[in-house]
Image (cartoon, rainbow, N blue to C red):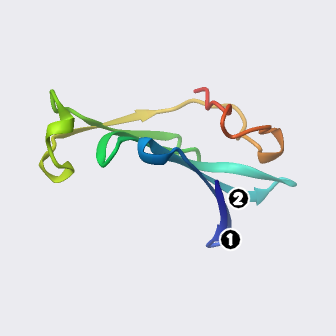
Amino acid sequence: MTVEIQDGNLLVHYLHGRYGYWTYTFRYQNADFELMEYFLADHHGSTVLSEVHIDFLTRKKYIWENMEENPYDKKEEDSAFVKILEDISIGSLYKLSEIQEFCTFEIKL
């Protein structure tokens, strides 16, 4: 896991080796760090299987799914992806102080 400050936001990168990674973007507001964006990249080695981006401010979820029958036989630039856009409904924003461990943290929409 790595942590950095970028454009005034706190970014937490949780790496899962060759199987992908998660990135959480927090902003300090309302006396806590609140989750503004979430990004998940699901890989198998260099093959991208899917990616998910959730923007909690705009309440949008973007999903890119590899549509290849056998994606492991193709390079990413030759793969076909479908993009799905969904509206999300959430109550309050997730707070960093409420996350005990990133390896078990689940975003529930």
Q: Identify which residue is drawn at 47% across, 41% down.
A: 60
Which residue: 30% across, 49% down? Answer: 46
Q: Residue at x 14, y 43 (%)?
A: 74
**Dot 2, crowdedness within 10 Å: few (<14), some or many (≥20)?**
some
The quadrant the C terminus occupies is: top right
How many numbered callouts?
2
- Look at the numbered discs 2 and 1 and tell me whether their residues touch, using CB distance below 8 Å: yes
Q: Is residue 85 left or right of residue 40?
A: left
User: Left of 87 or right of it: where is 64?
Assistant: left
Task: Label 2: state its secondary structure.
Answer: strand
Task: Kindly identify which residue carries mark 1.
Answer: 8
Residue at the far right in the pictured view? 31
Residue at image coords 46%, 33%: 87
Q: Earlier in the sequence, mark 2 or mark 1?
A: 1
The image quadrant of residue 107 is: top right
The span from disc 2 to disc 1 (Cα, nearest Å) is: 7 Å
Q: Nearer the viewer, residue 62 or 74?
A: 74
Which three-letter amino acid code belongs to the residue tagged 1?
A: Gly
Q: Is residue 68 above or below residue 19?
A: above
Rate crowding at label 1 as few (under 14), some (14 to 19) or many (20 or more) other CA atoms within 10 Å. Answer: few
33 sits to left or right of 20: right
Up/down of 11 relative to 89, above or below: below
Mark 1 element type: loop
Q: Position of residue 70 (x, y in %)?
A: 17, 30
Q: Where is mark 2, residue-wise?
A: 27
Three-letter amino acid code at the position of disc 2: Arg
